[in-house]
Image (cartoon, helix red, strand yellow):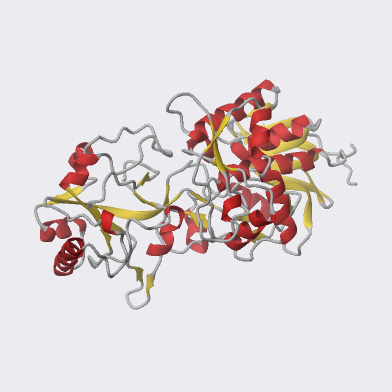
Amino acid sequence: MPAVSQLWDEETDVVVVGYGGAGAAAAISSHDAGAKVVILEKDEGGGNTQLATRTFLCPINTAAAREHIRALSFGTVEEETLDAFIEWCSRNVEFIRELGGEVEICPPGPTFPKLQGAEAMVRYRVKGTRGEPGGEALWRLLSQNVERRGIKLRRQTAAKKLVRAEDSVVGVAAEMAGKRHTIGARRAVVLSTGGFEYNEWLKRQFLSGYPIYAFGHTGNRGDGIKLAQELGAELWHMKSLAAPMGFKFPEWEAAFIMRMPASGFIIVDQAGKRFCNETGLEHYSMWMEVSRFDSERLRYSRIPSYLIFDEKTRLSGPVTTIGHGRNRAYQWSSDNSTELEKGWIQSGRDAAELAGKLSIESAREFENTLATYRETCRKGRDEDFGRSKETLVELEAPLYGVPLWPCLLNTQGGPKRNSRGEIMDVWGNPIKRLYGAGELGSIWGFLYQSGGNLGECLASGRMAGFHAASEHPLQD
């Protein structure tokens, strides 16, 4: 056991780096296991958890759950780690109730109902005040419990380096109010700093498709990845993500998620052609449909794509989810007229005019696409992409359009964790006294189950916090 002779600015048992859902759960778990805890947060706290709209996963702890999540992970998670995740995640509702929260079930549970074991996927939301999103209600519950326990929170304090003595992590060097601030960890450090949705370098290196924007917390820049890499951490799931389609405008750093109020719309590529069943896309995997690379022209020919809709759809409601993500304070107009005036949405009296405004390459191809789609609607059968008959609605001029981009709810990649939540090095050994939680090195290695990240925040945070608190204290 290493001796710690360094003089610290402060000392505690467990240091939690990052104060979102996973960090809060880790801090609560460590505290309740008898450890003294200090949380470091470079911003104000809340992360993507506070911005989430709906549910958390609490699977039924059965062999079916293992089979299902194993399939979603596509062979990227060891059995022991998978078992531990399901064990902790299946007790999420119990944990919420212990904190004083109430939950309600949110069907349907599985995102991929045709896969074996789908019946074990169950989603819940924390009951909040009227109209309060599930993530906001969850965050309010977690943060109140952190405060109630008197856990020390250092806001505006950014971790800059993990301090190591011999082969163990013994503390954190941070920056507080522009000055170096060191915190000793007698037992362990937990990294829960979120993903890398706003780190352009990491996105270019690991993700398919570019550019990929984001809906969530702008502080998610891969800080924990760098901290762990410096100590030789293995990375996993770096190409895994949850990414629907959305709109990105220069005035806002974050994107707006696409949500159509009616069926009078199609999506076309840069040549003006349809390429998918627009109403049948799996929400979290939409990025897969647009990440096709054109090797002849050296570009992603579907990034951006273009959302095309008609007047009836425009008047049916906002083409985005109100109150979602980082931009939730923006009040999108009920008929999209304000956004039309801003120039975010373009209009055209005919296909040629709209193609010109959107920079669609071929107005003729776009006109042909609209004509073909008109015939498809009249026949009531989409022979090209299998769109259901009830969604085949002819588009009536004037037409409207807006560029569509793949946009991250969050990334999943980061330092690899084992069945105790310990961060692993490149040789397959735990980095002693260093734990990880949340979407920083998430268990979701390929396909994403709805509610899975909030569920993982609760499960992996508790697991990491508990095991961190169980470490034998270092000797001075």
| The one of 107 and 194 positioned closer to us in this rendering | 107
Which residue is drawn at the image coordinates 13% and 59% (left, top)? 351
Q: Is residue 378 above or below residue 442?
A: below
Q: Quadrant of residue 74?
A: bottom right
Instruction: Decide if residue 341 is on the left or right side of residue 148.
Output: left
How many numbered discs?
0
**Whole-percent x, y for residue 208 in the image:** 46, 64
Q: Residue furthest bottom?
A: 296
Residue 181 visible within the image: no
Instruction: Decide if residue 470 is on the left or right side of residue 446.
Output: right
Residue 73 visible within the image: yes
| The one of 10 and 113 positioned closer to us in this rendering | 113
Q: Residue furthest left?
A: 349
Quadrant where the C terminus sits is top right
**Whole-percent x, y for residue 41 in the image:** 60, 35
Q: Quadrant of residue 47?
A: top right
**Whole-percent x, y for residue 390 in the image:** 27, 54
Which residue is drawn at the image coordinates 23% and 40% (left, top)? 316
Q: Is residue 183 above or below residue 356?
A: above
**Whole-percent x, y for residue 217 in the image:** 48, 41
Which residue is drawn at the image coordinates 13% and 52% (left, top)? 396
